Amino acid sequence: MSKWSQRWPSLRRSRPDVTAGWGGSPAVARPFPPVSGASAPWPGSCSAALTLRPYLTDSAPGDPGADLPYDGAMGDTAHHCSDMAATGVEADDVDRVLADKALLGRSGFASGSELYERARPGYPDDAVAHLLTSLALAPSSRVLDMAAGTGKLTRALVATGASVVASEPSASMRAVFASVLPGTPQVGATAELLPFADSTFDAVTVAQAFHWFDAPVALAECARVLRAGGGLAMVWNERDEEDPVVAELTRVSKWDVHQPYPVGMDFAAVIEASGYFGPVTRTKFRFTQELDRDAFVEQVASRSYIAILPEDRRQAILADVAALAARLDEPIPLPYLVDTFCARVG
């Protein structure tokens, strides 16, 4: 087994327990008390009520990720097979998954969420402050962090004292989220089918995820669950491609071949084209993540297109990234452009 196989063993997933209630059977990462009727108190709030629409459980056909393989307990390790990715994608299917954004987003984050949490950066204070100000969050606010992943942005939202709930389709991501933010409720849901009643939230946030969505459908869902005048905020950490180290990293990691959206894409036009949101304000920030050589390789290993590759192809790319890291002094600065988009529902 190679050095890189030992460092990033295959992560298997198990389905979490599912608690029914609130007018349906949403997949939840921690138990909520069963209730009768369509409403239940919002966890963590004495006054706000959270009403959920009927939704599929983790064990029901059509659940986000239900057609992905589950073959053991989360965190178990297994020997990689050269013809299968850690996510369970067969070698013959890799090119098809890489070419299909929906499949890539769904398969690429099926496992390895501990690595994602460890390697990916959070968001700089000035960018977070801008988002919070744009959304006018207060302790009385209800916030949905959509496609929350391991909670990189959620933790900043929770810190405001607002009532926050997260949605995330990946059971692997939800498991890590629950360990990082054990007091924050979350549901297993896709952006295109949110299990919440109309006008439930004052704000919806999306961090590092909107490019995976079916944009028109997801934006309609955002508008539906927001109250009149509610805010939508999106944010991306994008590596600064003008930096020579980033440019070389892009080349050796094949990011320029497999990136799921054009770097620097103006999502304002997509948001406004939905017809649900008013003028979009786009604001950019800068920050630098400092990494040791191992972390430099790990942040590449955490990418969706790397995760779905067969072991031999994955290790070849990671070896090239490690060779680049070996030529750089520690800590290795990795500069980012933080792209934010804020708007109000009409």
Image (cartoon, helix red, strand yellow):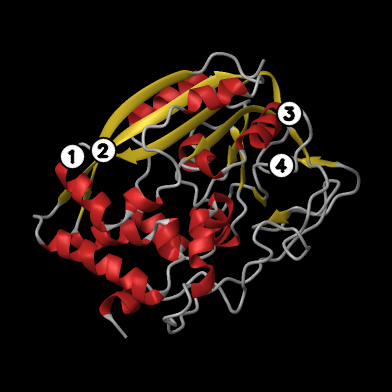
**Front residue of this view, candidates 200 and 45:** 200
Q: Quadrant of the C terminus?
A: top right
Give SS at disc 3.
Answer: helix
| Residue ID for mark 1 | 243
| Residue ID for mark 3 | 224
Q: CA distance from mark 2 to mark 1?
A: 6 Å
| Residue ID for mark 2 | 240
Give SS at disc 2.
Answer: loop
Q: Position of residue 330 (x, y in %)?
A: 12, 55
Between discs 2 and 4, the one toward the N terminus:
4
Q: Determine the image quadrant of residue 217.
A: top right
Q: CA distance from mark 3 to mark 2?
A: 35 Å
For disc 3, the neighbor class at 10 Å (few under 14, some 14 to 19, many from 20) is: some
Q: CA distance from mark 4 to mark 1?
A: 39 Å
**Front residue of this view, candidates 42 and 222:** 222
Q: Determine the image quadrant of residue 320.
A: bottom left
Between discs 4 and 1, the one toward the N terminus:
4
Between discs 3 and 4, the one toward the N terminus:
4
Between discs 3 and 2, the one toward the N terminus:
3
Q: Are marks 3 and 4 in contact (CB under 8 Å)?
A: yes
- Which residue is depicted at the point 69% across and 64% down? 66
| Residue kind at label 4, given as amino acid type | Leu
